[in-house]
Structure formats: C-alpha cells, structure tokens
Image: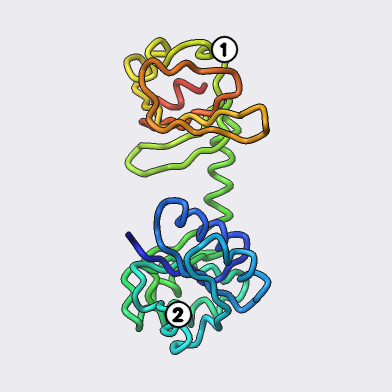
Amino acid sequence: MRHFLVIGLGRFGRAVAEGLTEAGAEVIGIDEDMNLVEAVRDRIAVAAQVDGVEPEALKAVGAAEADAAVVAIGEDFEAEVLTVAILKELGIREIVARAQDDRQRKILELVGATRVLFVEKEMGHRLARALAATHVTDHLNLGDGISLIYWTADDRVVGKTLAQTEFRSRWGLHVVAVKRPRPNGEESVTVMPDASFTLLAGDVLLLVGADARLKAFTK
C-alpha cells in the first residue's frame, strides 16, 4: 500500500485525498483550517490540523514516511514554495504542486517539485474535449496518444451485449467499467464486464483506447 501526504484540504486537496483513499492508498491530510480537517476526517486515514510550513509538525504526523506528497495550498504561493522545499528536505521523492503560470512552475521545480500541475488549464482542456465529443462526460489524457473517457451509452449500443457492440473488434476500445443508475438514486458499478453484459439506457461506460479511435467513435 502506498502512503500519500496531502497538504491543503480545500476543494482540490480534498478531492485528491478522497480519490487516493478510494484507490486503496493510505492518506494523511493536513490543513490549518480545522473545519476543513473535520470535513474529511472520516474519509481518509489521518486528518490533522497542522501548519504546513513547520518541519517538526510535518514529521509528527508521519509526513517523512510518505511515498509522495501533493501540495494543494491554493492562493498562498509563498507558503507553497516553502512547503515544497521542506518536503524535499524530508526526503519525499515525489512532490506534486500547483502553479498558475510558467514562472511559478519554474520556481516550484527549483525548490524540489517533481511534477507541477496547471489545474485550471488542464480542466479546461478536458472539458473542451468532452464538449466536442458526443455523449462524453469527461476525458483524461493518459499520455502516449492514449486516453480514458466516460461515455454515456447511445442508441448504437443500448440493448446490445458488449460482444455485439464491437467495441474491441471494430473500434479498438476497451470497456473498463460500466456505471448504472438504480431506481433508489444510487449507482452500481461493474468492473471489467464480460462479453455477455447487456447495456441499458443511462449506462455510463469507462472507455480506454487510442485518441484517434476514441475520436472516431464519439464523433
């Protein structure tokens, strides 16, 4: 099991912390705002009120043992830089931080960030790709010309089994999971459905494949 440290539990930080937990990782989440800490306390392994720029406080919550850290402090860039530098001194090998522009990216990389995100820019690109494709609700680029999308089943596939849809044989796409709404308002998720799985109206498919193939299928 991998261990992660998330510093800053605002909307972005909380989403990262909860997402990592759902993926099976152990997450330590910290923030100066006790209200934000309380909001996530029951959803991750450890949630603590800590000043992110205090080395001893970080050590006290086990930060030095983390495999990777995500710095999601938000608007306080000076605090973000100091935090990244301290995490580097603590020996954390993978440090992810946020930047608003190239100048901030360069500074963060100089003090030790191994990956810098332009969150708003990346989300904008994802939204643009999703809006440009039929029935696509989200799009994530995995690199090397491969992407993952959430796609709502349309008339081409509703009522058919996965074998009949020819996702793999004709389109070269793989169905990783299918999310299906239930009458009670909840959802069921079928991971790696077999060829006999029948698709229904309202199903959302998690598809992965080459960008060109996905574009051809959703166009």
Please name whichever residue, 41 or 55, is drawn nearer the observer in this view of the structure. Answer: 41
Q: Are marks 1 and 2 in contact (CB under 8 Å)?
A: no
In-front residue for pair 67/107: 67
- Residue 104 visible to the viewer: no
Q: Which residue is mark 2?
A: 61
User: Helix, strand, or loop for circle 2?
Assistant: loop
Q: CA distance from mark 1 to mark 2?
A: 52 Å
Going by the numbered disc 2, the residue's amino acid type is Val
Label 1: which residue?
A: 155
- Reading the chain from its start, which is encountered first: label 1 or label 2? 2
Q: Along the horizontal axis of the image, is 16 left or right of 181?
A: left
Name which residue lies at 42% across and 51% down: 23
Q: Position of residue 25 (x, y in %)?
A: 40, 58
**Element marked by disc 1:** loop
Q: Quadrant of residue 211?
A: top left
**Where 41 sits versus 176, above or below?**
below
Residue 134 screen position, x and y as percent: 57, 24
